[in-house]
Amino acid sequence: MQKKILAAVVASMMAGQAMAVTVVDDGTNKATIGGYLDLRYVDQGDNKGHMGDSSRINFAFEHKMTEATTVFAKAEWGFDTDGSKDDFFWQRQAYVGAMNDQLGSITYGQQWSSYGKVAGYTDQFAAAGGDASGYYGDDGDFLGTARAEDALQYNHSFMGLNISAQMQVGKKTESATVVNMDNSFVVTDTVTTDVERDGSYAIAASYDLPMGFSIGAAYNQAKVNGTVTEVTSAPVTTVEEDNFKAKSTIVGAKFEADKIYAAVTYAKLKNRAVLDGVEKAEGVEFYASYQLNEMFKVEGGYNQLKDESSNPGKAEIKHFPMAVVYTQGPVQLSGTYQFEKSTDKDGKDVDDKMVLQARYYF
């Protein structure tokens, strides 16, 4: 039942860094515009062509109330460059907050999650990765692990310890309708899925050691109420209801020193839609990069997410991305080859993937 429900939630976007141009800065007020245009060519089996849904633009504002306290706001939209989406713009972030040097920060709105404070350790590839930690998935924004919607969040750092706490307030419902037809295009039944998130909470903590090591852990739990309504061609309506908790737990470690970055995360997921909506899954991610010089970086890693349910299915994510990244000023070019050992829900092998990326920051 959980598979049916969570599979109906809309997909979240990939994360990424951002640069910004300062428009106003008078010492008290500051306004910036940032984002990038991102174009990609993807070659994976029968899937070949341009992918244009990774570009974004954001606006950020700050006002210094005192020497120690600043209020701020940010809004970000993704935009389509290949006409593959119904909407040219869609919301990625929108939040307001306040920060105090001694007390930390508090924010409200759609924003990067507390869970991502640790899941982000391994989500560093230019155009791949981030598939096995429970960070994203079709339900990441909705359940609060990615760009958490309707989220009240607190963050503070002191003496190397970083803490984050988050709560998604209120209820939100997502709906999806599937119309099934026979070979004569006659409607045989209509299935409507309503998914209600009845709040969630998350906590995260990490500790930064002086020599470049960091360790962290995070937990996210959401209460979900689901209803599946099936109307058949006969005057019969079937209604199924299910209430459950979606849980995501992650631990991780990273190392940063000079030209080297390396990180690993391990996640346990329950009632998440990241692997064809399986009941239980375990994921491991590894990422490492080496800065060859000022312009070139090489990176590699491993993602594996497997079904740990009592009756496991055939789907498994298992791939090894390798990439070369070139950066010069506002331009980033990258080439990624992803060696696939994954299988889909039918047990079929997934084809290797190649991604060529061109990005311009503004």
Image (tube, grey):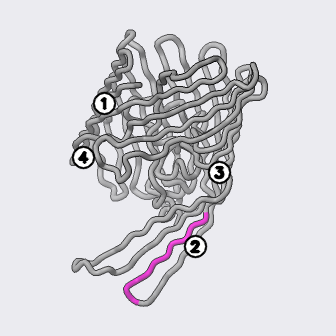
- The residue identified by callout 3 is 221
Closer to the chain start, of discs 3 and 2, is 3
Q: Which label was assigned to residue 357?
A: 1
Residue located farthest toward the bottom when viewing the structure as drawn = 235
Q: Residues within 10 Å of mark 4 (few under 14, many from 20)?
A: few
Q: CA distance from mark 3 to mark 2?
A: 20 Å
> Residue 211: x and y, percent?
62, 13
- Give whichever of 334, 332 is nearer the camera: 332
Q: Amino acid at mark 2?
A: Glu
Q: Amino acid at mark 4?
A: Asn
> Residue 347: x and y, percent?
33, 55
CB under 8 Å between callouts 3 and 1? no
Magenta region includes residue 132: no
Q: Residues within 10 Å of mark 2 (few under 14, many from 20)?
A: few
Q: Which label was assigned to residue 241?
A: 2
Q: Image height check: is 143 above or below 71?
A: below
Q: Residue at x 67, y 56 (%)?
A: 170
Closer to the chain start, of discs 4 and 1, is 4
User: Helix, strand or loop at disc 1?
Assistant: strand
- The residue identified by callout 4 is 47
